[in-house]
Amino acid sequence: MSAVQIGLAGAAAVMVQTALVWSVSANLDLPLVVVVLAALSRGPLTGLWMGTAVGFVQDMLSGGIVGVSGLCKSVVGVAAGVAGERLLVTASWQRSLILVAATFVHAGCFFGTYAFIPTTMPIGDWQDVAVQGVVNALVGSMAIVVAGNAPRWGRRTRGRVGLGAGSWREKHAR
Amino acid sequence: MKRRSRAAYLVLGVLVAHLALISSQVDSSPGTSVLHTATFGVLAEMQRAVSSTVAAGRNLWSGYVSLRGVREENAALQETIARLEMSLRAQDALVQQAHSLERLLELDRQVDLVTLSSRIIGLDATPWFRTVTIDRGLRHGVREDMAVIAPGGVVGRVVGAPGMRAAMVQLIVDRNAAAGALIERTRVPGVVVGSGDGTALRMDYVSNLEDVRVGDVIVTSGADGIYPYGLVLGRVAAVARGSGLYKSVSVEPGIEFSRMEHVLIVTNDERVAAANEVR
């Protein structure tokens, strides 16, 4: 995945998050999923920049203090990147486990930062975080399956188009 | 090794920059941040595009795909409309009668609000706050702290500096939202706040000595200077004697926020409403 593709995935994740229905939006942090997956595949520096950018955009479209999501997603991005470099996280279940852990680390950083800001309080508790962790892991696993198979599906589609084009050419050459 | 330490400095630098950004907002006096307004404006346009695409998809589905049995439904609806029209006329007469009685009794209740309709184009980008983005902004006369309502009652208020064509609304169920309130039956005052789970409300500062019953309607008191007097906030869902001086009163909001698509912004300014009608 190129840097541009990762950046686009981050922007799309934030926009999709704001267009979801309430029940899903309250239990899923799609931008976090994208940051963690990007960090796992490209390392801690990608996690840092991706976390900063995605978190900033998320904060701008949220009722919270600008910078808190950026800070927490940067921390999670770097940690996920380091984990991706040092641990074996190639299997889908391993990445799902990282996503659950990342959700808890992110929530800890988020609630922890807001504990120092008396004027603004986020909603939710650790039970909500647990639900969010599971949903994030499920969505992340699906994203891995889609991203992993996309080139194969693309080749298959192109192959079909190619065959069709070939037979058309053959027909008209005669 | 050198590259590693450079990366560590970079991480540290970014984290410090984040902390500086957060601190600047916490310490500074409230005001319009140019960066915030400009960025919000650009992002809101992206939200508008996504929202329009989603709406177009939904329309396509409802307009072409799921239109089975629409003829029968149409006939039934026509019949319902005819019945409702009759009932509406009867109610209009009653309303007229009530208005004249109200005038007779010189009850100066301000119920005629100047409002501006708006569509919700996006939800909060994080799961931790309850805000929505609406498609009206500075250009339409929307200002910070304007009340936002819907047929069921109070929705929330405009927070932050609005963009040119969009604004952010903090819903009343957000943990940071509050409104001056009254129990309609007994006129007992209190403060309604978001309960913390993002779906319900709580009424604070109601004395243990007061009479509060499940089902009592809670309305705005107008004391906060944001929400006009008499708008429905919700109904008492549960009430219990508190450990201190005050009762613990749970309130069910008057609005189903998950189904909300359009809202009204209370501008209370005839010029704003007129300008938007022309537009």
Image (tube, coloured by chain):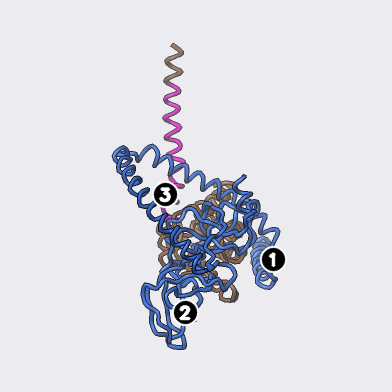
The quadrant the C terminus of chain A occupies is: top left
Q: Which chain's residue wears label 1?
A: B
- Disc 3: which residue: A145
Query: Residue flagged by tag 1: what amino acid is it?
Result: Gly
- Badge nearest the viewer, 2 or 3: 2
Label drawn at residue B31: 1
Q: CA distance from mark 2 to mark 3?
A: 58 Å
Label drawn at residue A162: none
Residue A47 visible in the snapshot: no
Q: Secondary structure at mark 3?
A: helix
Give the magenta part as a residue range: A138-166
Q: Could you say which is closer to the camera, residue A65 or residue B83?
A: B83
Graded by Cα atoms within 10 Å as few (under 14), some (14 to 19) or many (20 or more), the crowding at tag 1 reads few
Colour chosen for chain B: blue
Q: Is residue A156 left or right of residue B49?
A: left
Same-chain status of marks 3 and 1: no
Same-chain status of marks 2 and 1: yes
- Disc 2: which residue: B188
The brown one among the chains is A
Residue at 42% across / 78% down in the picture? B249
Residue B153 visible in the snapshot: yes
Quadrant assignment, res B199: bottom left
- In this view, the residue farthest toward the front is B104
